[in-house]
Image (cartoon, rainbow, N blue to C red):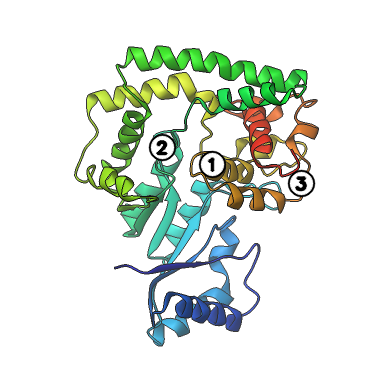
Amino acid sequence: LFINSKLYTEKEFTSKQDVIDRTNRSLERLQTDYLDCMMIHSAENSAILKDENFHSAMEQLKKEGKVRHLGVSCHGGNWAYDTEESLDKILLEAANDGRFDVILLAYNFINAEIAEKVLNACEQKNVATMIMKSNPVQIYGLMNERVAKLNEEGKEVDAYTQAFYDKYKIMNDNALEFFEEYQIKGESEIMEAASKYVLSNTKAHTTIWDFKNFDDVNNMLSLSGEKLTLKDSATLEGYKKHFGQVSCKIGCNDCESACPHHLPINKIARYNYYFSAKKQEKRAMSKFAKLNNKKPAEVCATCEGYCEQACNFGVSTRSLLASAQQNMDMIV
């Protein structure tokens, strides 16, 4: 067993003693007297990587045998509040720092261009890697369900939202073409290919998966030792072709830096991932409610779409934000 825990702070750790106290409480909850790794959770800029309160506390805890290794996780920067740093810039800094033994990052076939920069640097610096969000495939029928629900409730849909739905209806037609062209029987085949994509990269040392039941365990374990096939590669390329507009590249901050309203797009997209893909609705809604930002529906409908103009991948960012608010806004 490799026991890992994480400490989060928005900007800086308040004191060395606070870090020690929080670590001790983590040990108590885990009912263990040591951690294999303690991470800085969700680093949003490179400055937090050098926080002296954290490092001085970890140095003492290492001497006491309570912590063995240090790590850092990152979902990308937070330009809307603080910095223009991207996921790769932050984690490349962590790899070069010399004090971190493990890096936890999002890596999948959609954001490979960004994440593989970090994986290559970690290999050069002998830093271990943990992978999260390895499977960005989502059920393409979710939007159909949403549209049907609105129709049942008799709710009026504004022109902007209707245009957003229409895009997804077209995508549903494309999905049928995609499934037929690549002779795919169901979404599970795409998800298996996405998982094998990550497992095939020897620079990705371990992958985090969610297990909800024994079937999930058996399905995941069956992929152990499997490598990406030519059909798998073609399937993933086809998925990107047909669904690229709804697949945000985790860690890319081009849209946030272009947003005149300073919406935390990266966080909103991540929370919507928790809601839609991981089925953690309450957790996602709680986090979304704490953002205390302008609502996407209030600003995106009349915006000229600077985020989409800045995106090099053609992602329909405003549509994704509208979907996220409709999913997670407790008032709607």
- Left or right, residue 62 beside residue 289: left
| Cβ–Cβ under 8 Å for marks 2 and 3 | no
Q: How many C-alpha atoms fall within 10 Å of the one at disc 2: few (<14), some, or many (≥20)?
A: some
As measured in the structure, the alpha-carbon distance from the residue carrying label 1 to the one carrying label 3 is 19 Å
Q: Position of residue 279 (x, y in %)?
A: 51, 44
Q: In percent of the image, x 47 and y 61: which residue is there?
A: 72
* Residue most extreme to the front: 152
- Left or right, residue 28 beside residue 209: right
Q: In percent of the image, x 77 and y 22: which residue is there?
A: 156
On residue 213, the disc is none
Q: Earlier in the sequence, mark 1 or mark 2?
A: 2
Q: Position of residue 129 (x, y in %)?
A: 36, 55
As measured in the structure, the alpha-carbon distance from the residue carrying label 2 to the one carrying label 3 is 30 Å
Mark 3 belongs to which amino acid? Asn
Mark 1 belongs to which amino acid? Tyr
The residue where tag 3 is placed is: 293
Q: Can you say which quadrant of the picture contains the N terminus?
A: bottom left
Q: How many C-alpha atoms fall within 10 Å of the one at disc 3: few (<14), some, or many (≥20)?
A: few
| Numbered-mark total | 3
Secondary structure of residue under mark 3: loop
| Cβ–Cβ under 8 Å for marks 1 and 3 | no
On residue 112, the disc is 2
Q: Position of residue 80 (x, y in %)?
A: 70, 46
As measured in the structure, the alpha-carbon distance from the residue carrying label 1 to the one carrying label 2 is 18 Å
Image quarter of residue 266? top right
Secondary structure of residue under mark 1: helix
Q: Earlier in the sequence, mark 2 or mark 3?
A: 2
Q: In percent of the image, x 57 and y 65: which residue is there?
A: 8
Q: Nearer the viewer, mark 1 or mark 3?
A: 1
Q: How many C-alpha atoms fall within 10 Å of the one at disc 1: few (<14), some, or many (≥20)?
A: some
In the image, residue 12 sits, relative to residue 195, either above or below, namely below
The residue where tag 1 is placed is: 273
